[in-house]
């Protein structure tokens, strides 16, 4: 069975700046040597792209501008096999993220949402064509997209499609009231978030306790723990853990998104938490071993 996944949310151009010194050693106001490259990015775009490296089929709903970056992003989707429709908007600039990557592989992001603002119900394709939906939290966090995204959620739930949600970074969530983010979680079937985000949402410093609290609002919760692997649980079942696969870490950009893609492709079919966490870890290991948040065009990775 080929799972058809609709991915809704941000599509960005990542400008990745790898530095050979720790951030505290940057020569602010002067020059610091670096290696700079550009890649497709945005959580929803990344998940859709990594889904093409699983048994699933993906379609992206988002916006890019009618500029060179937008044309490049659409071309990358076409080459990877990500389906899309009406992605480019007139007179808009594509979203861009400057990603600073230090020698440990840790990344710090500086986003400009650009054309991603303003998603609306008219962007939603016929839901009969899909089995599950993934929603990036960056979209409802954007006040210009929020009304349209909430309309989409209502329609998706009415259609009975399982809804997977990643609440987005703590820095992004801090821009809106915490109660608002929690209200969205209650609408979801599965949430996938990292440990820092789980702590922020629950006030718990223990990942397992945070997971139990989140289960009160959502049927299934997965907490990504980076090099420590991941934990997951559905209501009425046992807690399941998996380890991160050993690999040389080059760049952690997109690691959580690639994990989500592997998890969704498996969980949508089997509902087996152990197999799904392991599938997520396997795809994430491929992501962190390369520069950028998406698979390389023209290769199996």
Image: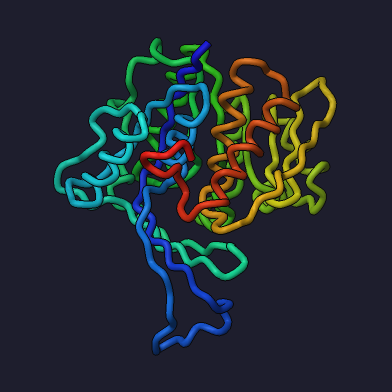
Query: Can you see residue 140?
Result: no
Q: Is residue 232 left or right of residue 40?
A: right
With respect to residue 117, does 278 lie above or below? above
Q: How is the image coloured?
A: rainbow
Residue shown at 43% from the left, 19% from the top: 155
Residue located farthest toward the left when viewing the structure as drawn: 91
**Marker count (numbered):** 0
Residue shown at 22% from the left, 46% from the top: 65
Q: Position of residue 276 (x, y in %)?
A: 67, 27
With respect to residue 70, does 171 lie above or below? below
Q: Position of residue 247 (x, y in %)?
A: 66, 50
Q: Nearer the viewer, residue 110 or 249?
A: 249
Residue located farthest toward the front when viewing the structure as drawn: 299
Residue shown at 33% from the left, 45% from the top: 116
With respect to residue 168, does 82 lie above or below? above
Quarter assignment of residue 170: bottom right
Q: Nearer the viewer, residue 73 or 154?
A: 73
Q: Nearer the viewer, residue 295 or 59?
A: 295
Q: Is residue 69 left or right of residue 243?
A: left
Q: Position of residue 83 (x, y in %)?
A: 33, 27
Query: Can you see residue 221?
Result: yes
Residue shown at 77% from the left, 43% from the top: 210
Q: Position of residue 43 (x, y in %)?
A: 47, 43
Quarter assignment of residue 57: top left
Q: Nearer the viewer, residue 36 or 112?
A: 36
């Amino acid at each position: 069975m080929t799972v058809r996944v609709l991915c809704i949310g941000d599509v960005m151009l990542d400008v990745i700046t790898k530095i050979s010194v720790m951030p505290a050693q940057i020569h602010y106001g002067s020059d610091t040597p670096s290696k700079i490259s550009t890649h497709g990015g945005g959580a929803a775009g990344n998940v859709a792209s990594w889904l093409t490296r699983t048994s699933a089929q993906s379609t992206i709903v988002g916006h890019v501008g009618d500029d060179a970056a937008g044309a490049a992003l659409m071309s990358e989707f076409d080459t990877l096999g990500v389906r899309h429709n009406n992605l480019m908007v007139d007179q808009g600039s594509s979203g861009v993220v400057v990603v600073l990557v230090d020698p440990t592989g840790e990344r710090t992001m500086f986003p400009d949402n650009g054309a991603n603002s303003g998603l609306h119900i008219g962007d939603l394709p016929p839901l009969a064509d899909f089995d599950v939906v993934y929603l990036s939290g960056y979209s409802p966090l954007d006040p210009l997209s929020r009304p349209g995204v909430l309309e989409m959620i209502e329609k998706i739930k009415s259609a009975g499609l399982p809804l997977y949600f990643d609440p987005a970074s703590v820095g992004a969530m801090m821009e809106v009231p915490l109660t608002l983010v929690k209200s969205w979680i209650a609408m979801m079937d599965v949430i996938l978030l990292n440990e820092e985000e789980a702590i922020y949402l629950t006030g718990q410093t223990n990942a397992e306790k945070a997971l139990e609290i989140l289960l009160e609002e959502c049927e299934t919760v997965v907490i990504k723990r980076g090099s420590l692997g991941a934990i997951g649980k559905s209501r009425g079942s046992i807690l399941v853990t998996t380890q991160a696969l050993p690999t040389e870490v080059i760049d952690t950009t997109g690691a959580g998104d690639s994990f989500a893609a592997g998890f969704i492709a498996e969980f949508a079919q089997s509902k087996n938490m152990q197999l799904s966490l392991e599938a997520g870890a396997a795809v994430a290991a491929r992501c962190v071993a390369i520069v950028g948040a998406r698979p390389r065009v023209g290769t199996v990775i």
